[in-house]
Image (cartoon, helix red, strand yellow):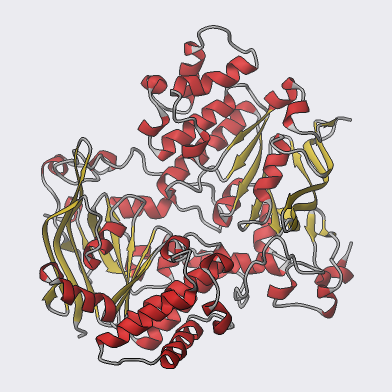
Amino acid sequence: MPSENILEVINLKKYFKVSKGVIKAVDDISFTVKYGETFGLVGESGSGKSTTGHVVVGLYAPTSGKILYEGIDMSMGVERRPLNLKKKIQMVFQDPATSLNPKRTIKQIIELPLKVHGISHGDASQKVAELLQMVELPVEYMDRYPTELGGGERQMVAIARALAVNPSFIILDEPTSALDVSIQAKIINMLMRFQKEFDLSYLFITHNLSLMRNVASRVAIMYLGKIAELAPTEEFFYNPLHPYTKMLLSSIPVITDEEEAMKPKKVISTGEIPGALNVPPGCSFHPRCPERLEICDKVDPCMLEISPGHFVRCHLYNSMKV
Amino acid sequence: MSNTLLNVEELHVHFKVYGGILKVLNDVALKVNEKEKVGLIGESGCGKTTTMRAIMRILPWNAIVPKAKIYFKGKNIMKMSDSELKKLRRGSISMIFQDPTAALNPVFKIRDQLFDIVRYTNLEVGKNLSKKETEEEAVRLLREAALPEPERILDSYPFQLSGGMRQRVCIAMALASAHDLLIADEPGTSLDVTIEDQILRLLKQIVEEKRTSIILISHALGAVKGFVDRVYVMYAGCIVESASTSDVFREPLHPYTKGLLAAVPKLTGGGVPEGIKGRVPDYMNPPIGCRFVTRCEYAMPICERKQPRMINAGNNHEVACFLYGE
């Protein structure tokens, strides 16, 4: 029976050596992405969510652990990955101002992946025009430079570039964080449409929980390189278990009374996110945790499945394991 | 009836750039009463920060101010001499900037930066503090900004502190001189959600305790909603709507405000809403009439010809839109 998972990440670790020690950017995380779903990865800055995305796309080789794409092991850096695998996995970066080469025209930018993967030889104007139309940009933009475009339009170009090679898996690393809300809505809707049209699976990385609520089917929350909680979206927002999830949810500024009513009460945000070099012992969240137990600063909790598909890494639920 | 502290009328600001003149602020008017918490919302590039810089008279060199009336406690800021301005900035108005990393000097310890501010603001009111008194005052300010171990903070360089701590230091600095009005320009935007929440709660508590007025600028609508009494909505250099916070969020009138509120994804789900179509007008050649006309779904012929004025739609809810009369 073929697996329902397009991507499996198993015990993935990515450490960086720096002069003062080792930064454990991603520390032993596991998750799967199913065919056609949007898997959300949330967390604050420095939680390792972008690093996870970069390792999956192959920008870094993992320190240890496995990444399986359709069952094929691709736990190596991008330079050793077969070309046909690279084609399947594309990425859209956060800031289109830096992810598009300012000295190339839009046509040259979108053309490059087509050439690399041998999809079109010679003049690719036709294909580039089609791609631009697909992301609802005027075809005349072909000869313009990224700086002549607005932020939202640039991000559309980045999306067109990712779609150029007919990928089946796209990593969206904060695709709308650098943009205004009115433009964000348009881009997200477009991405959701493409997902249906081309059967895409997304790994959606963002710090914006309200956005995540509306796009993802399952959500994992990261804190200091580890996944704290993983659950289907509804579960995650209506029945958050991990104290960090509760704190994050109660901190989101919202604009309607209905939203205010669903925020967890009385979990006031305190403390600072520790630096990645001195991660607290035991559960890394314990210095900020309002429900801390005695065991928390000594033993790092394990991932527990509380209800089907709802995982949490917290000592509070040790007795509730199913 | 409370007294007006700051009254801005007919504020126009242009910028000279290569290739022409950007007509950014267009007839901006806003009012802040004593002890009032006012919010200014709008998307990037709509002129929120420019408005505040005009009030502080710290616009960049290429700015032109063809017309402006900015009254602070009845005195026109535009006509103030350098020494009067110095007095204003040292004793009355202070600003917290978006990026605390850029607002602090990286090569001086917090002690040196904070001491200067404490010393000069006190000199302004005729108090010549000794070194010990200055230190006591600095420690008190840092405590007020909820920083643990203020003595250690004083001896740190900015890079030794986290983003949230740096912003707290900036708040402490602003508190030293903001006796009447505090301008907070996106104070939490460069920080993480949980830390932003802490900073905003701290700011709110401080201004309520000290009975200072505050202008909170933000593009995060939710952050503004939980904080201020009254909101101004800005679009492309114009104030388009002004009302009490609850009115703006419950019953927005201007088509832009409606579109903006609808575009925010909701925590309660329901899918991602449609955004506002089109893009912000070019400041080089802005539309003659309403600046929102090209993106507005209710646009009428008059909108292209004439600039809408602010009209009162009842209950002090003001809106600049022809849909509600001329």
Q: From the image, which quarter does the C terminus of chain A lie in?
A: bottom right
Residue A154 image offset from top left, x and y in percent: 45, 34
Residue A182 image offset from top left, x and y in percent: 41, 46
Residue B219 image offset from top left, x and y in percent: 40, 57
Tell me what residue is drawn at x 81 percent, y 44 percent: A63
How many dots with numbers? 0
Compared to A121, does B258 lie above or below?
below
Tell me what residue is drawn at x 45 percent, y 24 percent: A106
Residue B19 lies left or right of residue A155; in this view the side is: left
Compared to A133, does A303 lie above or below?
below
Tell me what residue is drawn at x 84 percent, y 59 percent: A303
In this view, the residue in front, B54 or A38, is B54
Compared to A212, does B248 lie above or below?
below
In this view, the residue in front, B91 or A76, is B91
Which residue, as the protein is rendered here, is positioned at the far top? Answer: A122
Residue B313 lies left or right of residue A57; in this view the side is: left
The image quarter containing residue A288 is bottom right
Residue B235 image offset from top left, x and y in percent: 28, 52
In this view, the residue in front, B290 or B103, is B103
Q: From the image, which quarter does the N terminus of chain A lie in?
A: top right
Q: Is residue A262 visible?
A: no
In this view, the residue in front, B50 or B196, is B50
Q: Can residue B177 be seen in this view?
A: yes
